[in-house]
Image (tube, grey):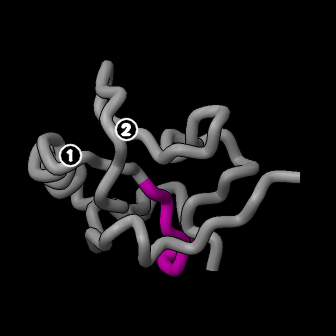
Amino acid sequence: MDVLGLGGGSAATPDPVGELICSAKGCRAEAAWGLLWNNPRLHTPERRKVWLACDDHREHLEQFLSARSFWKQTVPVAELDRQESA
C-alpha cells in the first residue's frame, strides 16, 4: 500500500531532494513519524492519508486529527511505503 501517495500532491509530499519534511505549518524539520488518518465523510474506511511529523510536532498533530475523529495510527516513517513519482 502506498500510504504516502507521492504522486498525489498531499501534505506528505517530500521536498525536491526526497527528504520527508514535517507537515506542521512552517516546520522544515525532517519527519520521523507518519500519522495515518482519513475523513470518514470523504474517504472509504480502508483509505489512509498521511501527515508527516517531526518529534516536536507529533503530539500536536495527533491531537488535531483525534479531535476530529480522523486519526487512525502513528508509525515510524521507515514503516511507510514510498513510491517514486513518475
Decide: is 33 above or below 65: below
Q: Is residue 60 left or right of residue 47?
A: left
Decide: is 26 above or below 18: above
Q: Is residue 25 left or right of residue 38?
A: left
Q: Is residue 79 left or right of residue 8?
A: left
Q: Earlier in the sequence, mark 1 or mark 2?
A: 2
Closer to the camera in the image, 68 or 35: 35
Instruction: Indicate the position of residue 18 as horizontal and vertical percent values.
Output: 61, 45
Q: Identify the disc placed on residue 61.
A: 1
Residue 46, magenta (yes or no): yes
Instruction: Indicate the position of residue 51 as horizontal and vertical percent values.
Output: 39, 50
Main secondary structure type of the part rendered in magenta: loop
Q: Please identify the quadrant where the N terminus is shown.
A: bottom right
Amino acid tagged 1 = Leu
Q: Identify the disc placed on residue 43.
A: none
- Packing grade of label 2 (10 A; few <14, some 14-19, many >=20) is many
Q: Which residues are magenta?
A: 44-50
Assign a secondary structure to mark 1.
Answer: helix
Q: Is residue 38 left or right of residue 81?
A: left
Residue annotated with mark 2: 23
Decide: is 64 above or below 77: above
Residue visible at 39% across and 65% down in the picture: 77
Amino acid tagged 2 = Ser
Residue visible at 42% across and 62% down in the picture: 38
Q: Residue furthest top?
A: 26
Residue visible at 18% across and 54% down in the picture: 62
Closer to the camera in the image, 33 or 11: 33
Q: Are marks 1 and 2 in contact (CB under 8 Å)?
A: yes
